[in-house]
Amino acid sequence: MQLQLLPFELKFKHTFTISRKSKDVQPLLVARLEQDGRYGLGETADNAYYHITVPMLMEAINTHRPFIEGYTLHTPEAFWETMHPLLKDMPFALCALDLAAHDLYAKMQGKKLYEVWGLDISHNPMTDFTIGIDSIDNMVAKLKEMPWPIYKIKLGTAHDVEIIKALRAHTDAVFRVDANCAWTVEETLHKADTLAKLGVEFIEQPLPAAAWEGMRDLYEKSALPIIADESCIEEGDVARCAGHFHGINIKLTKCGGITPARRMIFEAKRLGMKVMTGSMNESTVGTSAIAHLLPYLDYTDMDGPLLLAQDIATGIKINDGKIIYADRPGTGAEMY
């Protein structure tokens, strides 16, 4: 295979703020794998919480460039199993390669990726649209700017309930809230009672990632379902989340790509948990890959391209929450 790495820095439409940070730019890395005249695209992102930068990702992949370029792709799963020992400490890098391998493999079959898996897309969940932390007036303005059937509201402020009440006054849409580890057990239980009455569907990661005892309390007592994010990074975390969370949010960058994500989905379902996919504000390259997992999912948060002021690719389109696949094989992503 031939390998090409393409770094980007894409601007957000609005400053994107969660409980622990704000950012105006999203650094991204696209990997392009080519074999026998066909190519596949994969994507990954930097992340300050996990101390990951694009230069680190490029260095990790380039270290193994000779091996990758001497490899012949037969299945993406076999490629992942071969690459995992080499990049086990850098799953964000592995993700870009795995997505590219899946795109390339599906193109080799002349099928869309979900068709390779034999999936029915007729009941796919819709994606939410994220509203980052801001002044209440600005959050209301962002909601009005993007009418949507489902919103994910970032919280973790001294005015969380007031935010939801203000937003609720302007829409009947479904709300999901994400505290990004900013709350305590007592705070979550108190807010869950109020938020449930305001049409909130679930709470994502209210406590710090390692607060397992507190999570068990919430699992048993919360008025709303609790979904894991920072507490569920890789495959081994899924079983641990059972009995502590009602569902998990899988991010391809964190777990290392589609190959482990599918195993995580199957394990979570076996354990009776709901399954969601999230995003790291990827462009349409990474978001198009996420879309092919939709038939497996209960919820999805894949609005990355909608939050960006610029994109780098065509692929899936998002129309009022509904995902529309590109009419071409693979994941459907193509660079501009």
Image (tube, rainbow, N blue to C red):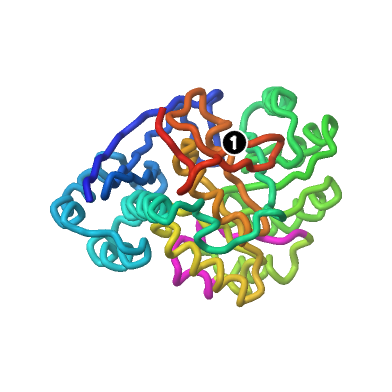
The magenta-colored residue range is 224-240
Q: Position of residue 252 (x, y in %)?
A: 46, 54
Q: Confirm whether the magenta stretch covers residue 239.
A: yes
Q: Which residue is mark 1?
A: 317
Which residue occupies 78% across, 44% down? 174
Q: Residue furthest left?
A: 66
Badge 1 marks a residue whose secondary structure is strand
Q: Nearer the viewer, residue 203 or 28?
A: 28
Q: Is residue 149 left or right of residue 16?
A: right
**Position of the C terminus by quadrant:** top left
Q: Residue at x 76, y 59 (%)?
A: 224
Q: Going 39% across and 42% down the picture, which residue do you hit?
A: 45
Give residue 319's position: percent from left, percent from top. Answer: 68, 35
Query: Which residue type does callout 1 highlight?
Result: Lys
Give neighbour class at mark 1: few <14, some 14-19, many 20+ (Cα, 10 Å).
some
Q: Is residue 19 above or below residue 312?
A: below
Asked whether 329 falls inside the magenta stretch, the response is no
Residue nearest the observer in this picture, 198 or 11: 11
- Say whether residue 28 is left or right of residue 130: left
The residue located at (31%, 41%) in the rendering is: 53
Q: Quadrant of residue 154?
A: top right
Q: Is residue 293 visible?
A: yes
